[in-house]
Image: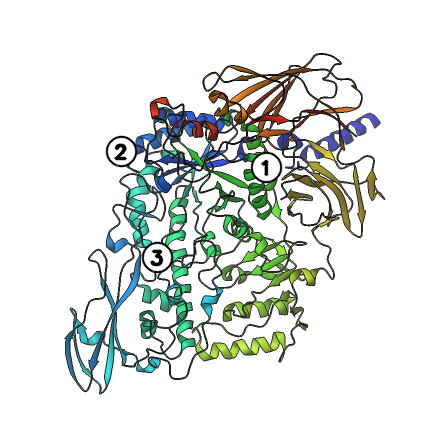
Amino acid sequence: MRVLSTLLCLLFLAMGYAQAPQSPLSPTDFLTPPQRYGIRCWWWWLNGNVTKAAISRDLAEMKAKGFSGACIFDAGGAEQRGNAQVPEGPMFGSRDWRDLYLHAINEAEKHGLVMSLSIQSGWNLGGPDITPEEAAKQVVFSETKVQGGTRIQQTLAQPPSRYDYYRDIVVLAIPYKETKERQPIRDFANKAATREVGWSVPETRPLLTDIPGTPGEEDAALKQVLNLNTYFKDGQLDWVAPPGDWTVIRLGYSPTDAHVSTSSGKWQGRVMDYMSAKHFNRYWDTHVEPLLQMIGDRAGKTLKYLQTDSFEAGGMNWTDGFEAEFKKRRGYDPIPYLPVLAGKIIESREVSNRFLNDLRKTLGDCISDNHYRVFAERAKKYGMGIQPESAGPHAGPFDGLKNYSHSEIMMSEFWSPSPHRSKHIDRFFVKQAASAAKIFDKKLVGAESFTTIGPHWNDVIWADMKPSADHEYCAGLNLVYLHTFTCSPRAMGLPGQEYFAGTHFNPNVTWWHYSGSFIQYLSRCQMMLQQGRSVADVLYYYGDHIPNLGRYKEDDPAGALPDYDYDLINEDKLLALAVKNGRIILPHGVSYRVLVLPNHQILSLVALKKVQALVLAGATVIGTPPLSTASLMGGATAEKERALIVLNLWGKAPAAVGMRSVGSGKVIWGKTAKEVLNVTLAPDCAFVQKPEGKIYDYIHRQVGAEDVYFISSQNPVSTQVTAAFRMQGKQPELWDAVTGEVRPASTFYQKEGKTFVPLDFGPNGSIFVVFRKALPAGSTAASKSPNYLNYRAIDTLKTRWRVLFDPEYGPQEMQLDSLISWTARPEPGIKYFSGAAMYRTNFDVADLNGQLFLDLGAVKDVGIAHVKVNGKDMGVLWCPPFRVPVTGLLKAKGNELEVMVVNSWRNRLVGDRGKPQNERITKTNVTIRPEWQLLDSGLLGPVRLMKGE
């Protein structure tokens, strides 16, 4: 009986163990990530010039390198910035193009790749069949001065129009007034949405205000605006005008001059009206529906996402039926205020600006609801999601977070260093997309990655690409889309056809064969960063103004950094917030400790009412009192209500710094989120004993009961720092995404609710610090040995090197007594060599004791070395320190070292510059520019034997 009981107990325990949920944080998967965590790419079908053979090769190579998928992206751009055009292939959507597309889907299905499709060629959605009626539109007007006191029978000049398309909105009259000395509405073109406000997430809140008004500067009071539509027909005005001089304004709309950008071949044409569901649906029925129907059930299985690229369509401020949309959303008739769009001031400068704010907000609503929402609904019928770049960085008339609400993958972009975008604020944009994923409960945060304008084949992986990706991983990125992977048919040669921009990353680059280690690094990061949810203590409400775009993480509008992280939220999701036990929560369970208001002191009444409700329910809100709604919604009554709420929350005449308890919550002003939280809450992650001037960043994700911190050193030199985590009672583990190694931290200590872990970083280094397992009871520290070895050089190799070059592109062999750049050699075949070269040497070791390492020193230009020691493959090194462990591999005499070093195409291109094509080794449409210089290449050393202690 006892044996039976024991067996039953063991069986019960076994069943319980088997049913216990397994952690998604698997060291085995981390070492070799499943394909689903792989990177993807913009798969550029350049000018439509692709072939079935090139398609098959590309997809097979993606699969082999661990990609999870790709986005078919037909586009032009080969010839921009002084480069040559490539042959024109089939036009997007044509029968021949569809044949290539079908082949691509078939091949992708075979390889198990997740595909996306850009639903046009180029970007700014539109094409050759977009009629003037379907095109993006803007308000146009003409003015006629008439003398009243009599019957006016007069033709009113038609406002300027494009494409012979013009439709009237209204004819209005206001008393004539000379206003030459008056200052116009400040920044009028941007406020009227007749153009993009800027190309790189500009600060747009100044559009909410203006210079102070001057009494009598207005063109007319609102009650003086007369609607003459009853007296206007077929271009003729027949009106008995009251006495006095009048300005008659004929307002209508006509297409903008926006055209599809960077498209292939004959796919040219107007940009569609982004505010019209009707016109989007017509485009879909003509161009998208046939592409989905022809692949059957692969739509939603192999082809899972649909894409449109950046909104760079300029301004647009009207659409068919816009006045009804405005009235429905803003609650008042816009027609009497339309003279403002003709540059007039109606009622007052403040009133006119408030109308323009309401106008832009309505434009943003219409773009979100009538374009991106409809896009998502049409895709959903096929079981597909959308991944448009719908939220900047170009500041069109929209709310970025509102647009993201319809996406399945929150798609953004980031840039590697390049002259076109050299500052961080112009390179990094992922924070907004990551916030959208959090507040809309989506998993994937994607980005067009490593975009550049200027560099060609000279990007250094560890110096340019890795720190850029790591920066955005810390902002919330978890799915890289390479920009760009150009499909290049064999006939286009090597390095082949290329888009004028982007980091060139395809099987034609010299280092493609060795790229797997870097790709695996990205996949390991994505495996970790796609688990659970990111942690942020601070929620920042970014206002309701239009355009409204979140900027890069360091912009830190809430004042949370560096100790705490933050998310952005827009008005729609603000209204969904609740409070539980003092924490601010979203319906899907995400919670925050504090809500921070924007500092421009303008809130919509609906947002302010919600803030009051949250405070009364127990929330902590940080921010100064709003002085205006900057809207005409609700009129004077709304402003009175605003003032009462402000009095209730902030009190009368609040000081510069203060705090008030209201209901169950409190309002704090004059302090940053960091200053408020530091009083009672330890930083989530803080870098202590930090070297002066050095930059580190992090992101924290919770995966069930486990915690993952990704730490990035944004420093191009080796550094040491101690990180303090808001964790206690758990063993910190170090997960190295470069090597796949997982090990417990051997040195750390815990104090006052924090765990302190010393970290060592190579140049632009990174590490995951993971807290999974409980420490033994009473344990608060571990100091068994350092977390990282100290390396001491014990010998420098001064041997003779034999270097074998790829015979297809250079001489077969050379001998070197010392390591020098290939560019220092006189032989043209070496000086201008691009490709892979094998270094071989033999060396002896005097001391075989201890932990031994071989350090290669400098590896140029792209920084890739494949190492073998005494016949053992040590793998591919792609970032410093270029060092491999050799303990147990060495012998006293006759050790064999092989190092395969790869450089980029740049030197061979420089060598081919000025030669006729039949004398060149390379072939490409990219112009070899006169300012390009040779880049140091090869194994430069010094190669040293090191001991780790």
Which residue is tagged 3? 275
Q: Residue furthest left?
A: 153
Alpha-carbon neighbours of circle 2 within 10 Å: few (<14), some, or many (≥20)? few
Tell me which amino acid carries mark 3: Met
State the SS at label 1: helix
- In space, the residues marked 2 and 1 are separated at their CA atoms by 39 Å
Tell me which amino acid carries mark 1: Met
Q: Is residue 5 left or right of residue 502?
A: right
Q: Is residue 133 left or right of residue 836?
A: left
State the SS at label 3: loop
Q: Is residue 250 left or right of residue 569?
A: left
Q: Residue at x 65, y 74 (%)?
A: 656
Q: Residue at x 80, y 23 (%)?
A: 850
- Residue 495: x and y in percent read 42, 28
Residue 95, which numbered label? 2
Query: Which corner quadrant holds the N terminus?
Result: top right
